């Protein structure tokens, strides 16, 4: 994998992690209630769940490429279209970023397990990774090392982003709950997803 391809994926992974989702809400909620130190356990849990998804997607894509290059190429095109569709959905999303603020006395282990379930039970993560990974895989190069680089990059980026959310949550609690802020974030990241999908489709053409 060339440095240019990795940098392009790095930028896309940052957008993926920054975009509001269940992991984001989990991190913000824990940061507001328990502070950033205790919330480190939940960030670890999110990454464990994400790593399981990455492993499953990586094995599936590797097997598919070994069996059919045509099918793999088709998935790349569908993936680019999905990114555009996801961007449109983000623009139309009117959901709230409201979080719970109860001060339950939970342990770090409980926060970690809850976060693992948050990511494991989010099927959108798998769909997104299936759409995203093929865009940056070079079929003529060994798949294992490429998937490892993409997976490690995804986890590290998401870890940094979630830590940022947790740290800022306690200071910006009132603004984070604002539906207006949520709508703005959805439109910003929706535009980014549409741009990523359009660029990938253009590059293939």
Image (tube, helix red, strand yellow):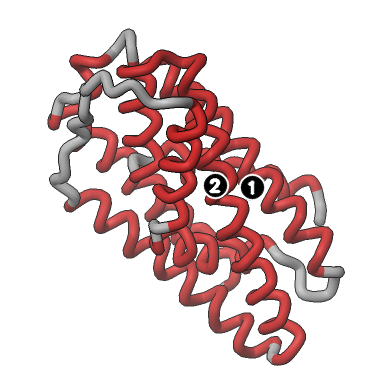
Front-lying residue, 69 or 29 = 29
* Residue to which mark 1 is pinned: 8
* Residue to which mark 2 is pinned: 12
Residue under the point 18% across and 31% down: 98
Residue under the point 28% across and 35% down: 185
Badge 1 vs badge 2, beta-carbon distance below 8 Å = yes
Front-lying residue, 129 or 111 = 111
Q: Is residue 88 above or below residue 109?
A: below
Q: Is residue 20 above or below residue 66?
A: above
> Dividing the picture into quarters, in which one does residue 13 lie?
top right
Tag count in the figure?
2
Position in image of residue 58 (x %, y %): 67, 67
Numbered circle sitting on residue 41: none
* Side of 165 relative to 145 (left or right): left
Query: Circle 1: is it few (<14), some (14-19), or many (20+) Cα within 10 Å?
Result: few
Query: Circle 2: is it few (<14), some (14-19), or many (20+) Cα within 10 Å?
Result: some
Position in image of residue 152 (x %, y %): 70, 46
Quadrant including the C terminus: bottom right
Q: Is residue 163 above or below residue 48?
A: above
Dot 2 lies on which element? helix
Position in image of residue 79 (x %, y %): 49, 70
Residue under the point 33% across and 21% down: 105
Residue under the point 48% across and 46% down: 116
Position in image of residue 197 (x %, y %): 46, 60
Quadrant including the N terminus: bottom right
Q: Label 1, label 2: how many angstroms apart (C-alpha)?
A: 6 Å
* Side of 181 relative to 75 (left or right): left
């Amino acid at each position: 994998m060339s440095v240019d391809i990795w940098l392009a994926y790095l930028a896309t992974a940052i957008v993926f992690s920054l975009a509001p989702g269940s992991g984001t809400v989990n991190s913000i909620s824990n940061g507001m209630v328990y502070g950033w130190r205790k919330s480190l356990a939940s960030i670890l849990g999110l990454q464990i769940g994400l790593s399981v998804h990455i492993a499953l997607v990586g094995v599936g894509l590797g097997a598919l490429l070994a069996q059919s290059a045509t099918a793999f190429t088709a998935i790349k095109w569908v993936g680019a279209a999905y990114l555009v569709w996801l961007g449109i959905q983000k623009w139309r999303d009117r959901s709230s970023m409201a979080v719970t603020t109860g001060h339950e006395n939970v342990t770090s282990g409980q926060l970690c397990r809850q976060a693992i379930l948050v990511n494991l039970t989010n099927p959108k993560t798998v769909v997104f990774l299936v759409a995203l990974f093929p865009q940056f895989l070079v079929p003529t190069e060994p798949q294992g090392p490429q998937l490892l680089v993409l997976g490690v990059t995804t986890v590290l980026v998401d870890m940094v982003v979630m830590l940022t959310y947790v740290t800022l949550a306690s200071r910006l609690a009132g603004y984070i709950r604002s539906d207006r802020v949520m709508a703005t974030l959805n439109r910003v990241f929706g535009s980014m997803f549409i741009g990523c999908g359009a660029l990938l489709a253009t590059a293939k053409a």
